[in-house]
Image: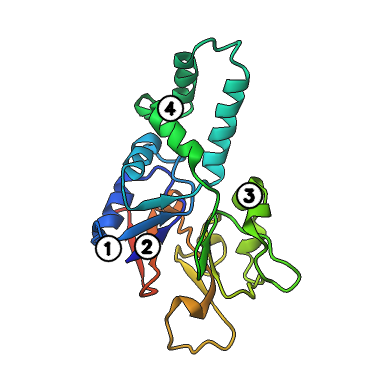
Amino acid sequence: MTYLISDIHAEYDLFMRLLDRIKFSDSDVLISCGDIIEKGNDSVRLLKFIKNMPNARCINGNHEHMFLKYFAGLLRDLKSYPDFDAVLNKLREYFPQDGNLLDWETVFWLNRLPYYIEEDDYVCVHAGVPLDERGCIVPLESVEEEKFVYDRTFKDPKTVVNDRKCVFFGHTPTSYILPDGSSKIIAYRRKGSPKNSYTLGDFYKIHLDTGTWLQGVAGCFCIETCNVYYVKKP
């Protein structure tokens, strides 16, 4: 099975409970749509755990993007930081709670992560993706990184994707979108799709951010079954 999550925000314990909830195994695949780090207490711990999962695929969110911009700034200013040990120490200060766990292998892994994942029937981004005048996804290789991680127009329920590919995204907690303020994954059904049909082709976009840090709810979506799974802080 292939499971998609977003915006875990350093909630290591809740993430581990979610893996137990779905009985995640070596034959499964996990796709993270960004913002693994910050807000919670276990940024580096969670980052290193996911990095070492052989069946995990990740893209950068805006929080990873900001960290990488900070890293790039340190490299440009090597006169102030004459050796790489000094640079690593500055990077460790970026994560006050567990920055001592950070190493170069993790930094370089993060620096190599893409900003989108594109498959035959779906696209994974952090915040959104530009659409053309017909509502179809533009060629992703032409999109600037900032658009993938900061665009909030995609969260608008009125933004409809007229493309055969379903778009997975996060960035904004769904509690800000749902009228009752609940923290649920929102799957937007294509016009004309049978209400009793649950395949990926029945949906044009799926909003994954359940507000893990903000609301204490971690959720994921299974592509093959279209089932959703949640765990919540006590």
Q: CA distance from mark 4 to mark 2?
A: 30 Å
Give residue 145's position: percent from left, percent from top.
63, 46
**Residue marked by disc 1:** 22
As measured in the structure, the alpha-carbon distance from the residue carrying label 4 to the one carrying label 3 is 24 Å
Q: Which mark is residue 3?
A: 2
Considering only order in the chain, which callout, 2 or 4, is on the residue closer to the N terminus?
2
Say few, some or many: other residues with alpha carbon within 10 Å of mark 3 (under 14 / 14 to 19 / 20 or more). some
Q: Residue at x 46, y 38 (%)?
A: 110
Residue 202: horizontal and vertical position, in percent? 50, 80
Residue drawn at x 34%, y 63% is 230
Q: How far apart are the alpha carbons under marks 2 and 3?
A: 23 Å
* Mark 3 lies on residue: 150
- Give the residue number, with chain letter if any, for mark 4: 96
Query: Tag 1, which secondary structure?
Result: loop
In what element is the residue under mark 4? loop
Three-letter code for the amino acid on which mark 2 is drawn = Tyr
Discs 1/2, front: 2
Secondary structure category for the residue under label 2? strand
Report, in whole angstroms, how far the alpha carbon at label 4 lies from the one at label 1: 31 Å
**Sequence order check, earlier mark of 2 and 3:** 2
The quadrant holding residue 95 is top left
Q: Tag 3's secondary structure?
A: helix
Q: Are marks 4 and 2 in contact (CB under 8 Å)?
A: no
4 or 3: tag closer to the N-terminus = 4
Mark toward the viewer: 4 or 1: 1
